[in-house]
Amino acid sequence: MKIAIIGTGISGNIAAYLLNQAHDITVYEKNNYIGGHSRTLEIDYDGKKIPVDTGFIVFNYRNYPLLTGMFKHLEVEVEKSDMSFAASINNSWLEYNTQSLAKLFAQKKNLLRPKYIGMLKDITSFFKESKLILESGEIDMNLGEFVKNLGLGDWFKRYFLYPMGGAIWSCPIEQMLQFPAYTFIRFFENHGLLATEGQPQWYTVTGGSKQYVEKLTASFDDKVRLNCAVKSIKRDNNKVEVTDQNGNTEVYDHVVMASHADESLKILSDATHEEKAILSNFTYQKNIAYLHRDVSLMPKNKNAWASWVYLSKEKEDKTPDISVSYWMNLLQNIDDKYPLFVTLNPHTEPDPELVFNRHEFHHPVFTKNAIKAQKEIELIQGKNNTWFCGAYQRYGFHEDGMMSGVNVAKELGVDLPWQES
């Protein structure tokens, strides 16, 4: 069959890799590179060439079985990484690092802050209550309602939960509080975040994620059309017409929409009532990422530096305005002589002289309506010879995108060439 695949993120790439083994595929990509959020830049840092990731960075073997199975099959080299969390609140008024007990008190004055000690106790209570929720089954309330019912302190909410959740999902606090509580808690549990020990070992791809992208796409890279956005898709007479930005129209037997849900809906010129009703429930948050060397976007106290640093600046309504800095030296084992950071949505932009790159990402926002729509995707899957895949169909991470792409390929008759773990 002739199959069009829209998008070269992890979902589109794994679908293309599998479907190419049995079908005639064509892959459309609006950008000038293959990979979506797998985006490695090779920068010139004072004469030294350094590959550094700006999107997908880390994974673990416990929660990413499909991804790690693919890495093994493709012989992708990986190395250990670090997944520590820290926070710097209101221009370093409060700083702490979860890497160790000593670093929780990176600021010695925290020992004398009753509210800080109370926050640590509330973290333990939250972990305990969350585990009970997971044991008892789903609950029909959002995260904001759940936290309110627990009666946990203001410091816990403002200086731990809100920054951590907002950082992980790259979304404003107001949106995060609308997350279904069970979805939020389940993700935390799966990633070892509901305990002070037992977290999985994290890894990163040696040389950057482009190494796996190149291996994954090698068998079909001649079938990828870069800088070729799809403008419209029309389904008729059991065929699919795809028209690109240049006005070229080609006819296919099937189309795999591996683009963001909102983009997919926009280019389906004859979207059905069901497609509109389901896909319109997925929304996205724009996030600006800077790759830079400006240390002012890290905590003032070096002991509070971690892989992920929440930079929180409270607004007048006391809700934090979240920014996140990723310490790439720790995440990707880059020589400390070359300090490198990726900062999302900085409160103050880094010094332009210290910026290597600026890029705009869009991340899915998991509202109650989005979670409901995830369960309804099956109602439109395959209808009109149209298939949908993307990380938005689960938690929004690499494994989720891969899972959806693999599922679509299976529906079209192609299974994984390696054994699933």
Image: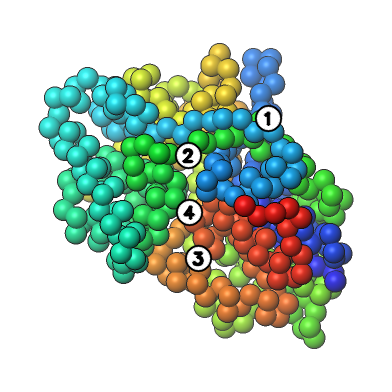
Vertical comparison of 362 with 372: above or below: above
Identified by mark 3, the residue type is: Phe
Q: Residue at x 44, y 60 (%)?
A: 366
Q: Earlier in the sequence, mark 2 or mark 3?
A: 2
**Pair 2/1: label in front:** 2
Vertical comparison of 153 with 352: above or below: below
Q: Residues within 10 Å of mark 2 (few under 14, many from 20)?
A: some
Identified by mark 1, the residue type is: Gly
Query: How far apart are labels 3 and 4 at the CA level?
Result: 10 Å
Query: How far apart are labels 2 and 1 at the CA level?
Result: 22 Å
Left or right: 142 with respect to 206? left
- Front position in the image: 226 or 331: 331
Which residue, given by chain and number where applicable, does mark 3 sit on? 282
Query: How far apart are labels 2 and 4 at the CA level?
Result: 28 Å
- Front position in the image: 286 or 261: 261
Q: Residue at x 16, y 53 (%)?
A: 151
Percent from the top left, x then y, of residue 106? 29, 22
Vertical comparison of 194 with 348: above or below: below
Left or right: 199 with respect to 320? right
Identified by mark 4, the residue type is: Gln
Which residue, given by chain and number where applicable, does mark 2 sit on? 200
Q: What is the total number of numbered labels drawn onto the structure image?
A: 4
**Pair 2/3: label in front:** 2
Which residue, given by chain and number where applicable, does mark 1 sit on? 207
Q: Are marks 2 and 3 in contact (CB under 8 Å)?
A: no
Task: Identify the secondary structure beneath mark 2.
Answer: loop
Q: Are marks 1 and 3 in contact (CB under 8 Å)?
A: no
Q: Earlier in the sequence, mark 2 or mark 1?
A: 2
